[in-house]
Image (tube, rainbow, N blue to C red):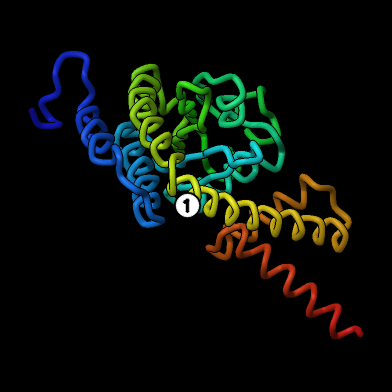
Amino acid sequence: MTPGNAGPGELPLDREVAAVVARMSGLLLSRETVDSLLELIVVLAVTSTPAAVGAGVTLFGEDGSPATTAASGEAVRSADELQYTLREGPCLAALRDVTPMRIDDTAADRRWPRWSAAAAESGLRSVLSVPLRSGTGCLGAIKVYSGTPGAFGPSDEHALGRLAAGAAALVAQALTNDGAKVLSERFRDALRGRDTIAMARGFLMASQGIDEEAAGERLLSLAQADGRTAAETATAILAAGRGTEASRA
């Protein structure tokens, strides 16, 4: 049976996910295969929810911190990073409660007011986050974003949930043996970027006399304007700040 001829109650991508799980089973994972795995999950997330304009995968690090380990673009990474910074948002709620979280319109949602307002301003209006459940708990979450209000409904939640079930098996496999070491390296990279962002946010607070929330929004605005990641922009801000200090010495 081809993906386009799925059986009753079966999504077109179900067999593709199952085939990937079978191929990954027992495989010794390298950085390349883990990267490919996470990128595949992102691609399938966008494909299984046609209204999505972007998707990402958040996993827990060894210290319990969430980190975006794969994303379809900078808009997704920035939206995720703002959740981690503000400590609020649908992805974090999905991780905490191990249940799907959906925002039909970020411009009207009041559950996570600071994050929703920033997401709406950046053009992201609908969000769906689904946890990656495993036998030992929650491994992370898959999330999709759309620029259209009301983009995701119950059928999309069902589709992403089916994908999450297969993806959780893949991630669990990646967390065994050498795969865990590879993922740990990814987390360290992600957290180093987050530390850089935190330092740049502190620099903006001190130099511009603004609060933490405004500094975070300023950083993300600069990143979007420059077409760079938040971490790249943070690095540039810190380098410019050090250059200014050196010229004054």
Q: Seen from this angle, which residue lies furthest right?
A: 249
In-image side of 212 versus 79 (left or right): right
Residue drawn at x 74%, y 75% as measured from the top left: 240
- Nearest the viewer among 249 and 36 is 36
The answer to whether any part of residue 118 appears in the image is no
- Residue at the spot of label 1: 182
Of residues 244 and 71, the one nearer the viewer is: 71
Q: Position of residue 193 (x, y in %)?
A: 63, 57
Identify the residue shown where x is 53% and y is 27%. 105
Looking at the image, which residue is at 55% across and 63% down?
228
For image coordinates 51% across by 33% down, the residue present is: 140
- Residue 52: percent from left, percent from top: 38, 37
Q: Position of residue 39 (x, y in %)?
A: 37, 48
Q: Is residue 67 left or right of residue 175?
A: right
Instruction: Answer with the quarter of the image where residue 168 lies.
Output: top left
Name the residue furthest left: 1
> Which residue sits furthest front?
177
Q: Is residue 13 left or right of residue 134?
A: left
What kind of residue is marked 1? Val
* Nearer-the-camera pick, 233 or 134: 134
